[in-house]
Amino acid sequence: LAEELNAVIVSIEYRLVPKVYFPEQIHDVVRATKYFLQPEVLHKYSVDPGRIGISGDSAGGNLAAALSQQLNQDTNLKNKVKVQALIYPVLQALDFNTPSYQQNANTPILPRYVMVKYWVDYFKGNYDFVQEMIVNNHTSLDVEEAAALRAHLNWTTLLPASIKKNYKPVVQTTGNARIIQKIPQLLDVRSAPLIADQEVLRGLPKTYILTCEHDVVRDDGIMYAKRLEKAGVEVTLDHFESCFHGCVIFASWPTYFSVGIQTQNSYIKWLNQNL
């Protein structure tokens, strides 16, 4: 990849659960990136300050999106990011009944139940809340903290008809406000970049978002693309009908599959054209 792009690639080894919990992961990537963006460090590694990109897949896509938002709001940064490339990013934990969550609830690799447990793990929460979160009891209409954020991920307006199909929103009238009280991180924009205010999205770099049809978080990426477009950001949404969460890694022996080659080539092509 580095040779194809004629670029220096830096992989940030942010700390993982259970060693640390949110928000330490985003703190790690912000610190590391700001260090690397210093002019003297870029010069040391022969990096063109005009060709800086941020990328990540899955949970890494979450951190890449949150990092881009953090850097965009930092007025002290001399070197800005040119592009962000998000591969099937995980972007919100407020609605586990988007069409993609409903459609792919039992899809292998990343079923809905596992995704919700990952979120609870990230926040060092209680597994007793998982079943209630699956039915959106944590963001019911009587949970005031979530009400103001609902419009930011209203998939009935953000998704095209071809994606919405005949799925219906799952909005509980009464739920369990205790979940948000115990896990307020669910509503933190650093963990859920999709719920950022429009002002935060303005000025973000040119963006590539890769989504897969057979993936619970498909709609996170599609909704984020729509919100970025509304904020005036140039966005390429690259959707793959036959692919699934994690497929990009299946591009080398012994898991050399067409879905991996197809998605990886498309990702690299976009970077070649835009970085």
Image (tube, helix red, strand yellow):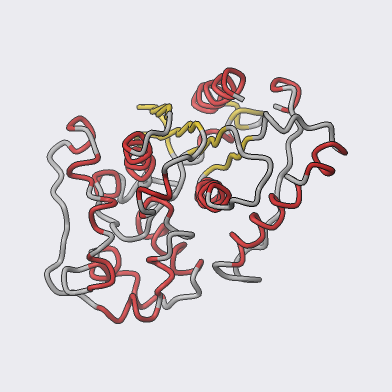
Task: State the residue in front, 259 or 6.
Answer: 6
In which quadrant of the rendered view does residue 103 lie?
top left
Q: In the image, is residue 50 above or below residue 44?
A: above
Q: Is residue 93 left or right of residue 25?
A: left
Measuring from the top left, give residue 148's x and y in whole percent. Answer: 25, 63
Residue shown at 41%/46% (left/top)? 108
Q: In the image, is residue 184 above or below residue 55?
A: below
Q: In the image, is residue 201 above or below residue 235?
A: below
| Number of numbered discs on residues | 0
Q: Is residue 249 left or right of residue 144?
A: right
Measuring from the top left, give residue 64's x and y in whole percent. Answer: 55, 47
Q: In the image, is residue 31 above or below residue 82?
A: below
Q: Quadrant of the C terminus?
A: top right
Q: Quadrant of the N terminus?
A: top right
Residue shown at 50%/75% (left/top)? 124
Residue shown at 54%/53% (left/top)? 70
Q: Is residue 152 left or right of residue 59?
A: left
Measuring from the top left, give residue 172's x and y in whole percent. Answer: 15, 66
Residue shown at 58%/52% (left/top)? 74
Task: State the residue in front, 216 or 234.
Answer: 234
